[in-house]
Image: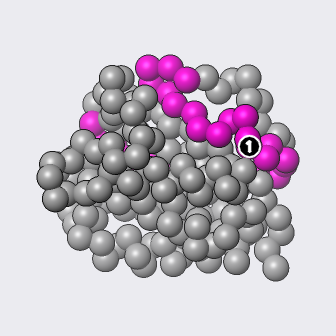
């Protein structure tokens, strides 16, 4: 299934999610539809988890945007580094064969504190209170990204928001 069809399905799922209430939400599909080397339900699971996290990052109304881009060259992996505002996952296991599809989930929430960022992929880690979540959402994302040989880049800025960008090798849609 093509990325644009998956984004259409995701749009329906997220627009009715209770966490979406009061927030601005938009999806920007690929100009040229492509498929990715990840099972469609896994793509939906990853983007759904990231989207719900983006909605829940603040009780204040904010914007959540999901954007798909086609990257025609392999990524210059030397430009990606972990730091106080950035975290990378599976860079060493990534299939960096072009063309790639970048799927970015961006919010204008409060951002992730530098002391919290290194912990976000740990199983059961959560910033939510009791009975507000299991802390497994990003752990599931991590597993699915690894299995698909994708890469995940997190960039955050306090007071400005966070972007999770998933990079996946692509193929023409069937």
Residue occupying the point 61% across, 23% down:
81
**Residue 34 seen anywhere in this rendered image of the structure:** yes
> Residue 102, position in %: x, y?
65, 50
Residue 101 on the magenta span: yes
Q: Quadrant of residue 96?
A: top right
Q: Where residue 75 sits in the image (x, y, percent)?
A: 76, 36
Q: Residues within 10 Å of mark 1 (few under 14, many from 20)?
A: many
Image location (x, y in percent) of residue 97: 85, 47
Residue at (50% x, 66% y) in the render: 45
Residue 113 image position (x, y, % from top left): 31, 27
Residue 108 relative to residue 85: left or right: left
The residue that mark 1 highlights is 94
Q: Which residue is found at the position 42% from the left and 60% from the top?
A: 49
58 up-or-down from 116: above or below: below
Q: Residue furthest top?
A: 83
**The one of 63 and 17 positioned closer to us in this rendering:** 17
Is 24 contained in the magenta span?
no
Residue 117 image-quadrant placement: top left
Query: Considering the image in quadrants, where does the N terminus appear?
Result: bottom right
Q: How many marks?
A: 1
Say which element carries label 1. loop
Rendered image coloring scheme:
one colour
Q: Is residue 3 left or right of residue 44?
A: right
Quarter occupied by the C terminus: bottom right
**Is residue 66 at least partly visible in the picture?**
no
In screen coordinates, is 165 left or right of 101?
left
- Image: magenta residue range: 82-110
Rendered position, 86 above or below 134: above
With respect to residue 113, does 101 lie above or below?
Answer: below
Compared to residue 122, the image places residue 173 above or below, namely below
* Residue at x-position 33% and y-position 43%: 125
């Amino acid at each position: 299934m093509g990325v644009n069809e998956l984004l259409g399905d995701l749009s329906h799922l997220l627009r009715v999610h209770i966490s979406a209430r009061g927030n601005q939400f938009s999806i920007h599909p690929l100009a040229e539809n492509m498929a990715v080397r990840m099972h469609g339900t896994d793509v939906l699971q990853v983007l759904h988890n990231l989207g719900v996290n983006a909605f829940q990052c603040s009780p204040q109304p904010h914007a959540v945007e999901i954007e798909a881009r086609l990257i025609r060259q392999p990524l210059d992996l030397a430009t990606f580094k972990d730091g106080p505002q950035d975290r990378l996952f599976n860079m060493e296991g990534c299939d960096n064969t072009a063309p790639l599809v970048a799927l970015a989930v961006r919010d204008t929430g409060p951002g992730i504190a530098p002391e919290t960022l290194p912990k976000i992929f740990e199983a059961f880690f959560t910033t939510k209170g009791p009975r507000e979540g299991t802390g497994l959402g990003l752990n599931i994302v991590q597993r699915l990204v690894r299995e698909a040989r994708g890469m995940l880049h997190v960039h955050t800025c306090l007071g400005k928001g966070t972007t999770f960008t998933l990079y996946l090798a692509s193929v023409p849609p069937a």
